[in-house]
Image (cartoon, rainbow, N blue to C red):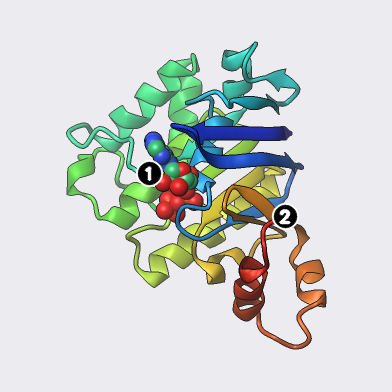
Amino acid sequence: MLTAQDLHKAYNGKPALQGVSLALRPGEMVALLGPNGAGKSTLLQLLTGLFSPDRGQITVLGHDMRRHPARALAGLGVVFQQSALDMDLSVLANLLFHTDLHGLPRATARQRITAGLAAVGLGDQAKAVVRSLSGGTRRKVELVRALLHEPAVLLMDEATVGLDPASRQHLLDTVCGLCHTRGMAVLWATHLIEEAKVADRLVLLHQGTVRFDGAIDTFMQASQGADFQTEVLRALEKPGL
Ligand SMILES: Nc1ncnc2c1ncn2[C@@H]1O[C@H](COP(=O)(O)OP(=O)(O)OP(=O)(O)O)[C@@H](O)[C@H]1O
């Protein structure tokens, strides 16, 4: 669904990503786990076409991000760390703005918006002005928006920042459920070890390189009884590749 091959990116000569490769498969929830500065946001910015890599290739549903960005981006839904909602507009107006951008007919758009809001328990909030909503509710609206054009791949960048534990868990459960029921591929970037545990697969990023990529069970096989957190910290302490 999405492939990244040998991505390199440097800022002012300082490498942020050094040869990162990744493939996302349908129905798979992948946690992109790494400490601050590991390169998670840089990787997501490249995957969403915001910047071009210095080297390497990205495809979404077979479309090359550099040569056919519009086709590649049509397959992606994104929730960034920073809110991208217009605070002074209603929930409905924000969502219609997104569906218009994607060229969805208004009738289809309204159907999907109604269903999307209902799915996250916000069926009665369409007319609410975004500024009046709590941070957790805004995040849910962002998730609904990211899914309106029915993307094959959902990218979430630290999407739970600022949420209380219950809202965080709810968002995580919702995305997990959607991933498995819709067959969507999800890349969930986080620095929170306990969030990564619920994923099907773990990609551990540190200092711009992938330290581990595989099933969580496989990751834990070498743990000799240690818990997930201890094992992640141990893997991050190992010398670079
Ligand atoms: N615009 C930029 N200009 C210069 N350096 C940058 C820029 N963006 C990121 N970096 C550097 O690139 C490296 C990777 O940063 P990045 O933000 O991708 O990591 P991250 O894993 O998302 O971290 P965090 O969890 O803190 O958001 C860091 O050393 C960071 O200082």
Could one spot residue 147 in this view of the protein? Answer: no
Which image quarter holds the C terminus?
A: bottom right
In what element is the residue under mark 1?
Answer: helix
Ligand 1, seen in the image, is in the quarter at: top left
Instruction: List x then y, in percent, for residue 95.
Output: 37, 30
Is residue 145 in sight in this rendering?
yes
| Image quarter (top left, top right, bottom left or bottom right) of the N terminus | top right
Q: Look at the picture and state if 197 lies above or below 146.
A: below
Q: Position of residue 14 (x, y in %)?
A: 49, 39
Q: Dot 2 corresponds to which residue?
A: 241
What is the x, y in percent for residue 165? 40, 71
The answer to whether the residue labelled 2 contacts the one labelled 1, judged by CB atoms less than 8 Å apart, is no
**Label 2 vs label 1, nearer the camera:** 2
Mark 1, Cα crowd under 10 Å, few <14 / some 14-19 / many 20+, is many
Q: CA distance from mark 2 to mark 1?
A: 40 Å
- Please report whichever mark, 2 or 1, sits nearer to the chain's N-terminal start: 1
Q: Which residue sits at x=39%, y=64%?
A: 167
Q: From the viewer's perspective, is 229 left or right of 215?
A: left
Task: Name the amino acid, label 1.
Answer: Val
Element marked by disc 2: loop
201 shown above or below 193: above
For residue 183, which quarter of the picture?
top right
Per the image, the residue denoted by label 1 is 141
Q: Is mark 1 within 8 Å of ligand 1?
A: no
Amino acid marked by disc 2: Leu
Judge whether 137 appears above or below 146 on screen.
below
Q: For this rendering, which residue is in front, 111 or 218?
A: 218
Q: Residue sitting at 59 percent across and 41 percent down?
A: 17
80 displayed left or right of 235: left
Q: Nearer the viewer, residue 41 or 170?
A: 41
